[in-house]
Amino acid sequence: MEVLEEKEEEEQREEEELKALEVNNELQDVETKVSMEQVCVPSDVPDFDWSSIDTSQLLSSYKTNSLKEKKLLHIADHFFQQYTHLCPDRKPLFLHPVNECGVEKFVSTTVRPTLLPYTELYHWDGCASFVSDYLTMEPLKSPITPPSSLYSPTTILKYQRGNCFDFSVLLCSMLLGAGYDAYCVHGYATREICMLDETLELCPLLRKPQEVPKEEVKKSSNKYRVKPPPELQSKFELQQEAKKKAESKAAQKNKEREEEGTEVEKPKRDPLYGLRVHAWVLVLSGKREVPETFFINPFTGNSHSTVDEHFLGIESVWNHRNYWVNMQDCWNGCKDLVFDLGDAIRWEIMLSGSNKPFQLLPDAEEENELSDRDTDDMEKEEEDMSFDMPPSWVAPIQISPREFGTRCSQGRKVILYKKAKLEKWAPYLNGNGLVKRLTIYADLDCTEVVEVREWFKNREDMLDMREVNKKTQLTTEYFSPGHLLSLKAHTYMSLESETEHTMEFYNEARVDGLQKRVENAKEMTEYFVGRDDFLHVRHTEFGKRGKKIHLAGTRTDISSRPIVQIKECFHRNLEKPADEDVAERIFLITEETIHLTYHLKDKYITASKKEFFKAAERDRKGNEIVMTPEMCITYQAGSSEKDKKLLPLYKLLQELTEEEKQLKQQVRQSEAEVLNILKIRENEETAVKLSVSIYNTERNEKRRQQYEAMKHTMEDELPGQQEQDLDYLAPFLIQIGHREKMTKGQALRVRDDCLADFKHRLINKANIIQARFEKAVEELQKKDQWFQENQKQLSAEEEDDFLTRYSETTFHIHILALRLNREKQMAPQKYLALEEKLRKDPRLAEHLSHA
């Protein structure tokens, strides 16, 4: 039996060895194929020769290594030897690639933490979107090996292109400058991530925001509270109903998937799955109130969870301070990884501190190989334990406002998603202010357009966004606050009149409180908010066209539509009884009747109503028609008696008739306003104007010309004016006739006169301040005396007003005292300074230098 078991074990070992050999052979074949095949570069990425870049203007730190950097490279080499000895099956580490000058630089020193002066770059999403938009992606030359070079972020920004490692280093530098705990990651990802293939991903603009479940408010427990009655419904039945609902939802989803089975496209099998090298950014929780650790894909600028299945493993991470090697198993991708970089078992640190032991080779394997040289190496390692990372060799990262405003490479960028295409432009690149366009398709081949969404910036008409449904040809425009007509949104199929239009307004900016207006050829409905008369809906029905009339502010060839009916709805006015507060009134213009419906009274199911039948004010003979009971039908809820008093009803009818005339005018004004809006929108679209800030001198041509004209004027006037201002001896030189050469007596006279005049001015200034100070003190004393005499007779408001003025006067006195004290202290210094200036004046120096 034992012999048979030994044979079976040997056979199993042989099979495992054969499988391992087969796997190794397959990997070697794949590597050879990848090395021979050309990397698929996107068609919109032009070829670029990095060997032709100019490095002559770079700093000396780019071309040489300092002593500390050389020592760091030596430590890195020794660390790599230990790593390869302990982990012979692992891939080589990405430690010190060459830079643009061909000099080896440690990856941590390539990171340059920088905070750029733009508010958008103070947050991680702004930094990530800027990097993804500003740079052009270049795939790695070999998808299964890291690059042999790593250029500085300044060079990458200059040429606006790079691979995933270049993207990550730049993004990590910006995040560290903004205060995030960020790290560059060298790992493995799927083909879609590495090649920036988002054709199978849903566009972020189309993703629905996740609904946050509302937290139930916990009621405070009270032991004296009456217990609620027991629930008589079976919990088992509720569970069964929930299961049935879940099963029905799952079945419905399966049906939808089956119906869309022809369109659903799964990613093709990747022979390099798990081997494709990628670099991204890791942001740990803690700093900047980051609640949870997450990844950032620098190619897209999107955040991903650390358990995202697109990230397949991590080799190492680094920042500007240290370098860590992942010692955890990545058989399940990054889902089971623990990102506690202080854990020496899970993460091997290169520059460990004095409190963390540096991992050495096992004693059992090195027991017979230790020598004097090895002991020296161990001593060096102990010294390396306290070695600090050298400062970054990269020049400060700078982005000009023009470059930041341009954003996309060459001002335009196109991203393909699943059934969608996203286009981005730099501001002011398009004459209509278009900065973003999303085209949604019905098929995966992106041939049938369903919807187009466009975003705008810097438009004078305040247009923000436009949605066009290609199937229904329905267009919806959204505006920012500040439009000339207070427009908020406009939905239409055509800008022609009498077609269907839905206009939303900023009701706060309108006097009438209009929030929304819906109009077509037959009717118009208006919605109001916050009106004093509690009106919230007005509905107007139109009939067939009649005679042509001219509306103010409209075209002359537009004929008015006859008004058939006007209906108004009102909110409840609590200051009136319910049976006197009108809830709805309908004016039937053609039938000459008016219907009034009042609000419901409490505990009533029917509302009071009144119906008026209008008659001509005078008959054919010219006699006035008297109000009759047949002209009004009333129903009073809760009362069986009819109101026999006709005078109140007659007055009410007169009021309603007058309001009907006013309503007709308001409806005509609304029609005219609609036509005016359509005309203005048509003009705004035909001649789009973009607003430019007065501080943007590059684009604001008018402001730039004014600035240059003012600058030239100042340059022309400044020399004479400056000479005139600085010639402080001019009044005294006039007295001696502006002689080029003066005698010693004349020079002394000019000096003494100038000093005496300056001393007199200082004294006068101090006297003026002293007089103002004394006057203010005298006024304060008078106010204080008046307040003490009349304090009892003053009201609270008068007393507060007096105290306010009293404190202002006290503050004014304090300022005057400070100015007077300052003048007295500075006067001798000013006098001595002028005396020294006169002594060095070239016109007087000859005679005053020895005086």
Image (spheres, rainbow, N blue to C red):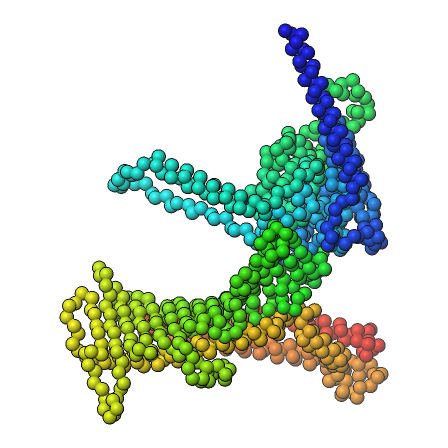
Judge by depth and name the residue closer to the eye, 397 or 356.
Answer: 397
Judge by depth and name the residue closer to the eye, 780 or 436.
Answer: 436
Tell how many labels: 0
Q: Looking at the image, which residue is at 79% across and 25% down?
A: 374
Judge by depth and name the residue closer to the eye, 523 or 202.
Answer: 523
Q: Looking at the image, which residue is at 79% across and 20% down?
A: 369
Q: Position of residue 690 (x, y in %)?
A: 62, 70
**Horizontal arrangement in the rendering, residue 507 relative to residue 314 (left or right):** left
**Horizontal arrangement in the rendering, residue 531 relative to residue 825 (left or right):** left
Q: Position of residue 494 (x, y in %)?
A: 53, 70
Q: Looking at the image, which residue is at 45% across and 43% down?
A: 249
One can see residue 11 in this view: yes
Q: Position of residue 405 (x, y in %)?
A: 67, 61
Most distant residue in the left direction: 641
Q: Position of residue 354 (x, y in %)?
A: 68, 32
348, above or below 44, in the image: above
7, above or below 828, in the image: above
Judge by depth and name the residue closer to the eye, 202 or 147.
Answer: 202
